[in-house]
Amino acid sequence: MSGASGAIDLSTLTAAHIREGIASGQFSAREVLDAAQTRIVEVDERVHAFLQLTPELAEEAAGAVDAAVASAHQAGLDPRDTLGPLAGVPVGLKDNMNIVGTNTTAGAKILENHVSVYDCTAARRLLDAGAVLVGKCNLDEFAFGSSTENSAFGPTRNPWDLERVPGGSSGGSAASVSAGEVVISLGSDTGGSIRQPGALTGTVALKPTYGRVSRYGIVAFGSSLDQIGPFGKTVEDCAMALQAIAGPDPMDATSAVEPVPDYVAAVGQAAAGGVKGLRVGVVTDLLEVEGLAGEVRSLVERAASVFGELGAQVGEVELPSAEHGLSAYYIIGPAEASSNLARFDGIRYGYRAHNPADVLDLYMRSRAEGFGPETIRRVMLGTYALSAGYYDAYYGQAQKARTLIKRDFSAAFERFDVLLTPTTPTTAFKIGEKSDDPLGMYLSDYYTIPVNLAGNCAISVPAGLGSDTGLPVGLQIIGDYFAEETVLRAAAAFEAAVEFDSRPRIRG
Ligand code: GLN
């Protein structure tokens, strides 16, 4: 809360606190923005959550909120009744989301100077709800990675330990919330890229059902997998953000027309003891996976007992096809990426090679010079998997595995409302530890990827600090298609029971 000196500490304020503080005149949106900017000056040289700050957009947005408070008073109205649901809340956006007035680099050198010419729907909806865009957050190049080390603009560091990665690919978005630089951020999750960094930074991180949120205006990676979702310090903050961004969009034919429920109310029900009788399935075969750290396993087991104590009906379930998730994903993801990235040819977008001999040389050199090593690896993998003669053996086979994973989930959701797994096999690893070991890096997405392949929803919520590393561990709560309400309610009940302190002490 705001102290006697008037200093605002964002690490202790939720979106709802901020809106209420502004509506009641306790502080102004301008002061909240100052607090965010001060915190960024204090820590971001070390954390490097941001690629770009957007002070002009931020000042304009904060000014508009303060003006709305003044005009509500003038009209004899209570600003609580007139302000947008996220009024004055400082936010960050993963830099693969276009917003006019910003550069959108996707963490790639090839897009270094790319200026957005239109808005990403989800991002625009967040800002239209009154949120104040403070800056664009770092990511692995084109969202390829699990550590943010693949960014062409240098890695982001984990606020819990600056020698460690924040996860990825939405590492900047996760770190910006974890470090108290913003209150909410948006990331994108194609194969775990919201939930995995959420787990490693002790933040709450939600991947909505495929189609729940429009993908329009995001730099496309895997179009059958990509989904935008929020990070927050609390489940309620994620619910508020989802409320703002969810719903159909005429610009994205895959966005779902399913009605948008009241997610914030679902979180409120949790507070009223709302998980009594909820059927919670612990995915036991995924607790036997080699490479799962003991400290992670024991916190997930403890989480299951917490649900039991809260009155849920806890049982056991298996997802036998989940073990094929990684291999299927590393065919389907790169296959889709290789076609989505065909547009970066040195002509239509971004970086262009100098003095080309001819047009083929221009294409080839612009891509070879503009793409980083992981991007090149993905394009090669994907092109190979789709090439004549190999299509059935790789892509066709991967699609079959995808179907089996979907079936496992539907069978499990006949018996359970939500499923519990670890979000990641280990806590945050050291910067550099896995950068020469792509397979080791890919393994950190073991638990998150099956959900992208099936297309349902899941949240990562802090389960505690690991007993060996002292670093945050994430619990993944998986729900059926469009069951975000249930997932949020379960996560909120769990959050209240474990009382995790989400504030890291930035050291180093
Ligand atoms: N880490 C995974 C990958 O590198 C997932 C990325 C993502 O979800 N954007 O593909």
Image: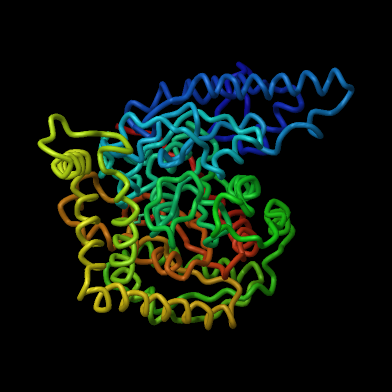
Left or right side of 125 for 469: left
Q: How is the image coloured?
A: rainbow
User: What residue is rendered at 30% in x and 32% in y?
Assistant: 112
Kindly tell me whether residue 147 is visible in this rendering.
Answer: yes
Viewer-nearest residue: 143 or 31 = 143
Quarter of the image for the N terminus: give it.
top right
Is residue 204 shown above or below 297? above
Residue visible at 55% across and 80% down in the picture: 315
Q: Is residue 264 left or right of residue 132?
A: right
Q: Position of residue 274 (x, y in %)?
A: 71, 64
Residue 252: horizontal and vertical position, in percent? 54, 53
Q: Which corner quadrant holds the C terminus?
A: top left
Residue 155 makes an appearance in the image: no
- List x then y, in percent, for residue 462: 48, 54
User: Along the horizontal axis of the image, is 405 left or right of 56?
Assistant: left
Q: Nearer the viewer, residue 287 or 97?
A: 97
Q: Residue at x 29, y 50 (%)?
A: 342
Location of residue 15 (image quadrant): top right
For residue 63, above or below residue 212: above
Q: Residue furthest left?
A: 357
